[in-house]
Amino acid sequence: MAVAEAPTTHDYEPIVDREFAEIFLRNVDDPIKTHVMGMFHGWWKVAPEDAIEQYLDLFRSQPGAEEYLAQRHLPEPLSLDDLASCAPGSLGHAYRSFIVDNDLMANLATNYRQLHDHLGSQGALDRMPDDLRYAVVRGFMIHDFVHTITGNPPNVRGELTVAGFHFAQMQYPYHAFRLAVTTGHVALVNPKGIVMVMDAFCEGWMRGRSAKNIHFEKWEQQLDRPLVDIRSEFEVEVTP
């Protein structure tokens, strides 16, 4: 049976911008060194209009998204002092322990919000819909809450598992890029990482799919709730 020839440049119109594809390949070369955030910010200028619309439709179709988007909840970042009085076993206590034990910056979301506003003022995000602009800022704000609730540490395996969980509950382009870049890296550069990467992504994806959506909650207002009750209510399975 004859093998069909690849289309030539004369009869094939690329969909993915080729300059952006080069940036994607640089991320595939070394996902940790480059990080997908720069690629995520740069995509909107060259993104196919249909892809943007599909992402927006996917986001708005999530149960609870309408109220979440209408409220535009963006509280001031918590400080460690705000969390000091939270009782052991509570979400606030576990969240504070996660920040302190892993030497993480408590104002990470503030820094990202400033960067996001700066990029917006420069026109870099002009084609990003307002609803998705809000969602990415709020998403970074609760990222460490997702770590805390799901029980995943901030190492490579834990971050990939959380990325799979995020992606399962919020089919957002940032997490799609993380999946594409990481699987591209192990496919083309580091095959020994295939098992760990796929185990982590698939574990996070399946647990995110089976749990109730935790992304639309105002966790800053639920700090005193027992963490075990939250996991039970949202049906979040935690790895020992």
Image (cartoon, rainbow, N blue to C red):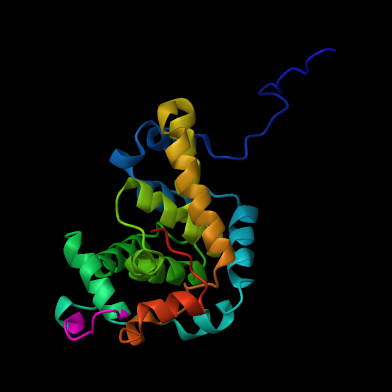
At 20% from the left and 59% from the top, the residue drawn is: 102
Q: Is residue 69 left or right of residue 137?
A: right
At 36% from the left and 70% from the top, the residue drawn is: 142
Location of the N terminus by quadrant is: top right
- Quarter assignment of residue 163: bottom left
Residue 136 visible in the snapshot? yes
Image spot of residue 92 (x, y percent): 27, 79
Q: Is residue 33 left or right of residue 232?
A: left
Q: Nearer the viewer, residue 139 or 22?
A: 139
Q: Is residue 78 left or right of residue 44?
A: left
Which region shows up in magenta? 82-90
At 52% from the left and 66% from the top, the residue drawn is: 129
Residue 77 visible in the snapshot? no
Question: In the image, is residue 52 above or below residue 219?
Answer: above
Would you say residue 101 sits in the magenta stretch? no
- Quarter assignment of residue 221: bottom left
